[in-house]
Image (cartoon, rainbow, N blue to C red):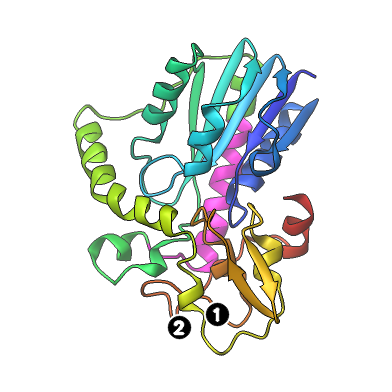
Amino acid sequence: MKNIIFYFSGTGNTYWAAKTLADRIGDCQLINIAQYDNSRALSADRVGIFFPVYYWGLPNIIKKFLNSVLINTSYLYEVHTMGGYDGIATIQLEKILDTRNMKLSASYRIKMPNNIALINKSNLLTDVNRLPDEKNISKLFNKATDKLNKYSSMIIDKQAHRNFEPFFVRPWHSFGYKLNEKETSVLWQRGNIFSSNLDSSCTGCGLCSKVCPVENIRMVSQKPVWGQKCEFCMSCLHACPVKAINYGYSKGKKRYKIPQNLDWYIKKR
């Protein structure tokens, strides 16, 4: 196998990016990190790690994956999707790789529709990063496609690459991550935050359980019950057809649907 792409995706943005790039570079195996057995060592000419930026940092599941995965490759790259800012996700990733005597060859970014702004109270920041309308979502996907076409050539040639970041931005990103760190650690520890935010409009359709990438939701008496391994990916919240799942200030707000058929995502996850 010449190429392996590991990915983690919640609402589907990162899966779409991983699949699109895999189609461009060819001879590629796509592996869902949430379903991967880390005890298996894998080798390939090029290995990519795709993930979304959560609260200006790495998702919890990516940290665990990086600390245990066994990879043999001459070109290890990462591609992160983001609705707002990169934060310190790449810095965190490289620090973990250093402890494993692994080196990152290249880092790439893809701007995608923000799927988390709706849980926040309206303010200047979330107004800038609010869920875009369909026209702007289409623009984001078109730009993302162009970037992935460019990145595919660079990856095939095993080029070194780093995302441009002005010198004054890193302290700001580190500060922003620290502000969010306490909240995110509580979210991941609690794991079942959505259970107490399920309203009576729930029809028991079970779609939330089907789209959960870590299989953290089970249906009990036609109602969803969340376990203790929630990644806060927002997949269940956005997929619910009656908006019965809420958190923060999401009640009544528009949900995000990746511009693809939902059944396609459920089958491919």
Give the magenta part as a residue range: 130-150
Position in image of residue 147 (x %, y %): 55, 36
Taking 56 as reference, is 213 above or below it? below
The first of marks 1 and 2 along the sequence is 1
Relative placement, left or right, of 125 versus 195 is: left
Residue at point 44%, 24% (across, down): 96
Position in image of residue 39 (x %, y %): 68, 26
Relative placement, left or right, of 143 versus 203 is: left
Residues marked 1 and 2 touching at CB (< 8 Å): yes
Front residue of 184/124: it is 184
Residue 180 in view of the camera: yes
Front residue of 151/202: it is 202
Q: Is residue 224 magenta?
A: no
Taking 172 as reference, is 98 above or below it? above
Q: Amino acid at mark 2?
A: Gly
Position in image of residue 93 (x %, y %): 44, 28
Residue 254 in view of the camera: no
Residue at point 23%, 49% (across, down): 179
Image quarter (top left, top right, bottom left or bottom right) of the N terminus: top right
* Disc number for residue 252: 2
Q: Amino acid at mark 1?
A: Lys
Disc 1 element: loop
Relative placement, left or right, of 130 versus 266 is: left
Residue at point 25%, 29% (across, down): 166
Relative placement, left or right, of 165 versus 103 is: left
Disc 2 element: loop
The residue that label 1 is drawn on is: 243
Cα separation, mark 1 vs mark 2, equals 7 Å
Q: Is residue 141 magenta?
A: yes
